[in-house]
Image (tube, grey):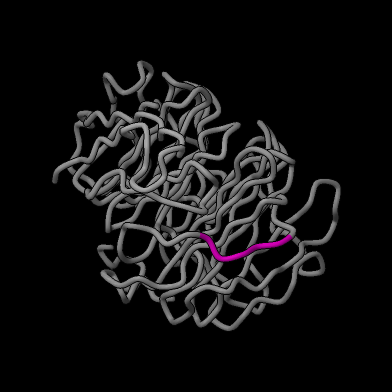
Amino acid sequence: MSLAIRRMVLGLVFALAGSGTLRGQGSAPRPPLITLVEQTSGTDALLQAVSPVSQRVVWASGHAGTILLTLDGGGTWVTRPSEAGDSLQFRDVHGFSGREAVVLTSGNGPLSRLYRTEDGGASWSLTFLMEEPAGFLDCLDFLDETHGFAYGDSFDGVPFLLETKDGGRNWNRVSAAALPAAGQGEGGFAASGTCARAAPDGAFWIATGAGGNARLLSLRSGAGQWSVQEAPVVRGDAAGLTTVAFGAAGSGVALGGDLAQMEARTDNVLLTRDGGRTWAAGGALHLLGPVYGSAFVPGTTTVVAVGPGGADVSDDGGRTWRALSDQTYWAVGVAAGGVGWMVGPRGRITRIEW
């Protein structure tokens, strides 16, 4: 997919507290109270990724070389110096602590890079530089403090997948023998950093799209081969899956849409109740257009989905949804205990409290 398509630009906040009953269903449970709090990021850049380490330590990143860190739950966001000034787009970030993090930049060829910090972002070490002119990194995630994967668009008939076993200090490409063949033009959407996701059961998942493709790649704990499942969602040149997330008791969602239909409803919600062994269509979203990012409240079946059309929340793992906000967001992350952050255009950061 071209860089131009990837750069497509993809208010009043609704604070929803249930009345205790749903109309016509007097015994329905009350949805949990959710409070949205706008925070001051100190930047006007488009923010595309957020990584809560805890309810106090959170990393965020985006365009114009923007990397942000808070150590007080977002009361104060501090801009961290980035390599190459404002010329890079930091489309994903994974925080391990307030001192250690890995960031991913997206762009054609050498504009796709991976960096690591061990001093809270005061300095960064370049750990991977894309040497293939057609290469394009999309997203990354970690199973634990050492083992992680970074995914990028295919260009040689094989999914481009990097693996690290030392916390992102060194990366190696996964052998083609361990992967299924890539579809023509298949890749990820570098929108929220959540097209690659580690699941609570130790599996690793990748959501793909573009070029008429829509698939889920997965590596089960202890397996040596990656598996692939076709995803029955909307397909097209700039359509497919954009994000995947997992919660408690095997619940998970895979979401996406068509970036060429920003105000339309499409088949873009899949859910699983068995850890991804089987997938089925989920409930219809309130927000129009594609979903860019998603995140579960850890240990629960509550999941948030965000995109240009707003933000939705589901308390039942994606079977039913209700509106959370009509603001545009690109990414969402939630810390254990039920505190999350949504980020988006013009430096927007919103804290979510359950």
Q: Main secondary structure of the magenta part?
A: loop
Q: Locate the N terminus by quadrant.
A: bottom left
Answer whether residue 184 is magenta in the image: no
Taking 354 as reference, is 230 left or right? Answer: right
Q: Locate the C terminus by quadrant.
A: top left
Taking 267 as reference, is 218 left or right? Answer: right
Q: Looking at the image, which residue is at 17% across and 42% down? A: 44
Residue 83 percent location from the top left of the image: 38, 41
Taking 254 as reference, is 170 left or right? Answer: right
Foreground residue, 184 or 110?
184
**The residue stretch that appears in magenta:** 278-282
Residue 118 percent location from the top left of the image: 52, 25
In the rendered image, which quarter is residue 71 located in?
top left
Q: Does 236 sit above or below residue 195?
A: below
Q: Looking at the image, which residue is at 50% across and 81% down? A: 211
Residue 257 percent location from the top left of the image: 42, 69
Q: Does 105 sit above or below residue 145?
A: below
Q: Does 31 sit above or below residue 86?
A: above
